Image (spheres, grey):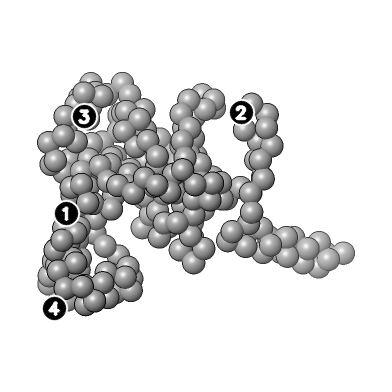
Amino acid sequence: DRIQVNIAAAVLSMFHHDSPILTMRAVTGRPGDETPMLQSQIQSIVLNPPWNVPSSIASKELWPKERANPGYLARNDFIVIPTGDGGSRLQQKAGPKAALGLIKFDFANPYGVYLHDTPSRARFSSFSRLASHGCVRVERPVDLARAVMEGDSVWTPQAIDDAIASGKTVRATLPQQIAVYLLYWTAYVTPDGQVNFRDDPYGWDRILVQRIDAAVHGSA
């Protein structure tokens, strides 16, 4: 059982007994903000999550918008939180404008990435969907939340809907952790046997080929 994201194709699939039971489009990191390859375990989901803005995004994107258009941060539900060391950080409150949408799927990793909903839906209709800062936006987050919480006596589909409707931030622990894989496949076969090819947007295939070539000729 696992959740598998093909970064290059921007597609998410959930497997049960090694068979796909749920597939949806995703939005992955744009070149320069690559979604990393990793393996982890999803332990919990957060309903109505606030967004703790990474300092790089705050300094490069949000503060310049505030300086150019005073009040931008307040209009988009951002608040400034003191850090205790004389500094501060930005947080976007949960709600209809929140960048993380209604649901976030948490898993431990050193890159600070996760799966999440988004209020910006237009990109899902595009063939090329590499547009995020590195996290993976999912097309049908409620369906995915119901799937990972299936069998839980507390977090039934109705309970999930009610919690989202309340607007309150709630963390729900999965009844059983599920593996998550973020992979970079520019060639792959779908369950119906169709072979698919994608571009190499990150240039990682080129690097791999160069390393294989160096290893082969180095051992010759």
Quadrant in which residue 157 is drawn: top left
Q: Earlier in the sequence, mark 2 or mark 3?
A: 3
- The residue pinned by badge 1 equals 93
Spatial separation of the CA atoms under disc 3 and disc 1: 19 Å
- The residue pinned by badge 3 equals 161
Disc on res. 46: none
Q: Secondary structure at mark 4?
A: loop
User: Disc 2 residue type?
Assistant: Pro
Label 3 CA crowd tier, 10 Å (few <14, some 14–19, many 20+): some
Q: Secondary structure at mark 1?
A: loop
Residue lying at 48% horizontally and 32% vertically, measured from the top left: 23
User: Disc 1 residue type?
Assistant: Lys
Residue lying at 28% horizontally and 53% vertically, measured from the top left: 99
Reply above or below: 8 against 206.
above
Q: Secondary structure at mark 3?
A: helix
Looking at the picture, how far across and down is residue 220, in whole percent? 87, 64
Label 4 CA crowd tier, 10 Å (few <14, some 14–19, many 20+): few
- The residue pinned by badge 4 equals 86
